[in-house]
Image (spheres, helix red, strand yellow):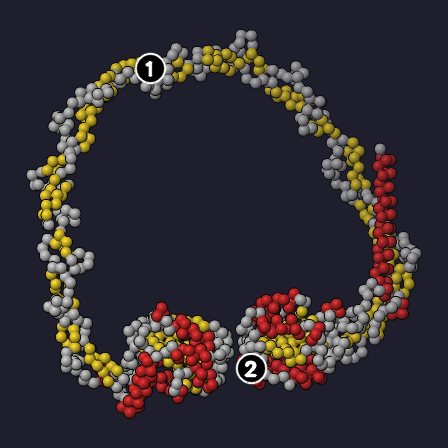
Amino acid sequence: MGNITAFSCFIFLTFAVFTTARPKSGPDQKCKSGPVDLVFLIDSSRSVRPHEFETMRKFMIDILNTLDIGLDTTRVGVVQYSSKVRSEFFLKTHSKLESMVKAINEIVPLAQGTMTGLAIRYLMNEAFTPGQGDRPKVPNVAVIVTDGRPQDRVAEVAAEAREKGIEIYAVGVARADMTSLRAMASPPFEDHVFLVERFDLIHQFGLQFQDKLCGIDLCLESDHGCEHICESSPGSYTCDCLPGYRLNTDGKTCSAIDLCAEGKHDCQQICTSSPGSFTCDCNQGYHLNNDKKTCSPVDLCTEGKHDCGQVCVYMGPGIFTCDCNEGFRLNEDEKSCSPIDLCAEGKHGCEQVCVYSGPGIFTCDCNEGYRLNGDKKTCSPIDLCAEGKHDCQQVCVYSGPGSFTCDCNEGYRLNGDKKTCSPIDLCAEGKHGCEQVCIYSGPGSFTCDCNEGYRLNGDKKTCSPIDLCAEGKHGCEQVCIYSGPGSFTCDCNEGYRLNGDKKTCSPIDLCAEGKHDCEQVCVNMGPGIFTCDCNKGYRLNEDEKSCSAIDLCAEGKHDCEQLCISAPGVFTCDCNKGFKLNKDKRTCTNMDMCNTVKHGCEYQCVNTPGSFYCVCPEGQLLQEDGKTCGTCKSANIDLVLLIDGSKSVRPQNFELVKKFVNQVVDSLDVSAHGTRVGLVQYSSRVRTEFPLNMYHTAADIKNAVMKVDYMEKGTMTGLALKHMLENSFSEAEGARPASRNIPRVGLVFTDGRSQDDISEYAKKAKEAGITMYAVGVGKAVEDELREIASDPVDKHFYYTTDFTAINTIAENLKLNICPAESQGEVEVKDPCACENMVEFQQGTINTLDLLTEKLAAMASRLEQLENQLLSRK
């Protein structure tokens, strides 16, 4: 807290100096205020217009251009807030002005509420913390820019922030509340509170803030005389020295500190001095340990600092000799080693072969065809045949130490691989006398056979062809045709076709196979013979193939009074429109429906031929039942209107909203037993202006609407939907029981995004059977409106860009707000009543009579066809 107080004093002192004798500075000269941790807290609520946010963005950049930005000078962070808080970058994020400006230009506004208290708490808990770049003993400065009244409490949290040492500047624009600004800012308020009329004047604060932050630096603008370092303080300066030096008694010059000479060291052997510091070293043959103070003797062998080829032997600090591993001897250079080869030096006892296997090591081996004996020195010859170590298929022949040849048994010959054997096949080699087929029967043996269709003669070598047709060995039902030795095919007589078994035959039925050109009926007359006929109601034409329908109506062979309806060979009678067919199915009677049935028209029945319709007096509309009349079709509903009273609506627009509500009321048939209307206003809270059972005339409702006071706070649409579902449509507030089937309709009017969740109670309202309409203006969010609206959404969702157009929406709502199924307390007619059944019953009887006649005609035709078929047989 002391640092901030000093910083404030410094600001006011330098401000006084600047107003009297501030030097002229170039456009690129930076502020030299000393280290400062500065965080901008900017309001991005939906009331801040896009061009206003751009002005705020330029305001921050203009201030940054005057500051000495750097991790060791001025650090800057930016936090934006609405209903939530988001850090755009922390104090530690950027060390250069360019990257900081780029980040500010990329900020996307949140466009929600104005939770300033929540944002100040975020400054304390997150922005001004060591983890995010806040430095100890460096002043913390916050600049809050807002255009509105906070939607939460700021006084307590701002006081807590000031107690933690944060100096707060509060900048209000346009609609900002001065009381809220003073609750946020640090005292004195005349130096920390700024209020401008619009965003394009915010640069005035930027100039004042620059003057407060940038005072005179005496180290830069005076002849201070410091030898090393000059450190500014408000209105003064002090000299200091570089590390390793101490300030002399003159307060300006510096002297090097020699710690070695002063004995202020702990080196074991050697101390080497530098200003204000020292380093330790060791005598020759020793090296400095990791503690940089003590020394240890140097072991060149252990450290690998030698040139021995194999073995290094430590002889004392810095001294060694070389040696060799076993099997090697030291060369004349006393460093490198050479391997000992006992085979080359003849120092072995091998009978045949000595094999070098490493320095001073050998093994004995034998020449090819010999095997090393158990003494590992002498050798014996190898008989591969006797040992079975050969790959001959049949016979192995020994041919010397480690050598053999292969042979074959009688009747076989050795193959080209000189190992395997193959039997001798006389058939394959053509060494036989068979006429057709030679069959191999073993090595050097064979028998003769014949091809299919031939049989072997008595000489067991030659063959003769077989004629199965001549021998009667065929099985054909009608005809056998010889087709070669041992082969034949079957065939059929004319008028028959060979069956799938290729032996038996079946007569050909051209009718059954569809191989005819009859239009309707084909009659089979024998194999390959047919005649044509026609179905009942048709007659055969002169071409003896096609048929023509018999039209009794066209031929005048009927007794219908009005209409004759023809079918092939039969007819039915019918009547003209406005007449009905009598029971004799031939004559007709005129129908006057208005006088002969209970038509149910409330006002007047109008006859049409065979039917009627209802009409209403002028000024009234025919209802959905087609009989009753009213001012609005099915006008009896329970309607609750939820209107947005948030501050973004503005007072003059709220008056337009109330006129919109009254336009909707004008379109309804309001009464205690007809339509009931309730009104709810919501902002950050919800208030029932009047329930469904309070007013029973349109005039009373409209008067009450115009007296509603504007709330002017937040936008809690989800809370309003919950209130509507749980309270407004309760029987306690005038909603009629669900058993009465009076439709419940909810209409939500809003101009912006909800500050709470709407999903849960928008869904519950529709599940409870409430028909939901959503009307949006200006910044209303289309996705939220669609989520509120009932299906089909396009008939329950309305939007306009400004309040002056909402009267158009009210006109459109007149036809849609009266549900078709509602009749209030008017009696709902039984759809099965007598007058509604007359036409249905008469039509059903006529249809059944027509079907009966058609079935009788079909039965008669089937009987005729059956008689024709019997006569042809």
The outermost residue toward the left is 332
Q: Please tell me how crowded label 2 is: few (under 14), some (14-19), or many (20+) other residues with Cα within 10 Å.
A: some
Q: Looking at the image, which residue is at 41% across and 74% down?
A: 123
Q: Is residue 315 left or right of residue 607?
A: left
Query: 101 and 396: which one is in front?
Result: 101
Taking the view exactly as shown, the residue that stands out farthest to the bottom is 20
Crowding near the residue tagged with mark 1, few <14, some 14–19, many ≥20 C-alpha atoms within 10 Å? many
Residue 216, quarter of the rendered image: bottom left
Three-letter code, disc 1:
Cys
Query: Which quadrant of the figure contains the N terminus?
Result: bottom left
Residue located at (69% from left, 82% from top): 701
Q: Quadrant of residue 235?
A: bottom left
Q: Position of residue 556 (x, y in %)?
A: 89, 54
**Relative image position of residue 282 (x, y in whole percent):** 12, 58
Question: In which quarter of the view is residue 412 placed?
Answer: top left
> Where does the image place residue 319, in percent across and percent down from the top left?
9, 47
Residue type highlighted by circle 2: Glu
Q: Nearer the viewer, mark 2 or mark 1?
A: 2
Residue 798 appears in the rendering: no
- Residue at (35, 70) in percent of width and height: 130
Q: Tell me the number on the disc at residue 712.
A: 2
Q: Marks 2 and 1, Cα distance to the nearest angstrom?
A: 116 Å
Which is nearer the N-term, disc 2 or disc 1? 1
**SS type, badge 2:** loop
Q: Tag 1's secondary structure?
A: strand
Q: Which one is in front, 296 or 442? A: 296
Position of 693 compared to 107: left or right?
right
Left or right, 29 with respect to 420, comes to left
Residue 396's mark?
1
Which residue occupies the foreground of this view, 95 or 271?
A: 271
Residue displayed at 78% across by 73% down:
825
